[in-house]
Image (tube, rainbow, N blue to C red):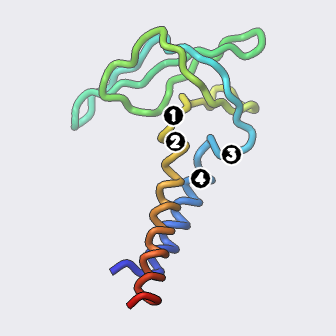
Amino acid sequence: MLTLKSFFIFAILGILFMIKNPFHKRGFLRAQGIITDYEKEETDTGIVYYARVKFPLGEEEILFTDNTPLSKKPPLNKFVEVLYNKEDPQKAEIESNFSIIFPWLFILVSFLILIYNLMQIFIF
């Protein structure tokens, strides 16, 4: 049975993921980058790839390796949106819809649990 304790757990997890997620932090800026290469790594479950991305910042170009594991080789010369830390541009990542939506999924589930509990109280 879904309890109010579950509501609080999912809500707190959603808020924590939102706080930890660079997209939701202040100090991160957007830039247009291009995938120039990739790193290949063998794991117990198979081979994963990490995209190497280059983006311009003023007079210099910043090169970083995205930390999102990919099951397929990333397409070279593809333009991507990059989130980077204005204080330390090497701390960057490829912006993804998942990074934006993930925290909200936990918050949505928490409110669905709350609605379910309220329906159990007032309807039955």
Label drawn at residue 33 = none
> In the rendered structure, which disc, 4 or 1, sits on the residue that comes first in sequence?
4
Q: Where residue 38 sits: x, y (%)? A: 41, 17
State if disc 2 and disc 1 touch (CB < 8 Å): yes
Q: Residues within 10 Å of mark 2 (few under 14, many from 20)?
A: some
Foreground label between 3 and 1: 1
Q: Which mark sits nearer the N-terminus, 4 or 3?
A: 4
- Residue 96 - label: 1
Q: Nearer the viewer, residue 38 or 106?
A: 106
**Residue 72 locus on image (x, y percent):** 31, 23
Residue at point 37% right, 78% down? 2
> In the rendered image of this protein, does residue 1 appear above or below residue 38?
below
Left or right, 115 with reference to 29: left
Q: Are marks 4 and 3 in contact (CB under 8 Å)?
A: no
Tell which circle, 4 or 2, labels the residue nearer the N-terminal end: 4
Separation (CA) of disc 4 from disc 3: 8 Å
Q: Amino acid at mark 1?
A: Ser
* Residue identified by numbered label 4: 18
Task: Identify the secondary structure beneath mark 2.
Answer: helix
Residue found farthest to the front: 123
Mark sitting on residue 99: 2
Q: Image point 52% across, 74% down: which residue?
A: 8
Which mark lies nearer to you, 2 or 3?
2
x 72%, y 11%: residue:
60
Where does residue 53 sit, x and y in percent of width and height?
A: 53, 18
Question: Hey, what amino acid is under mark 3?
Answer: Lys
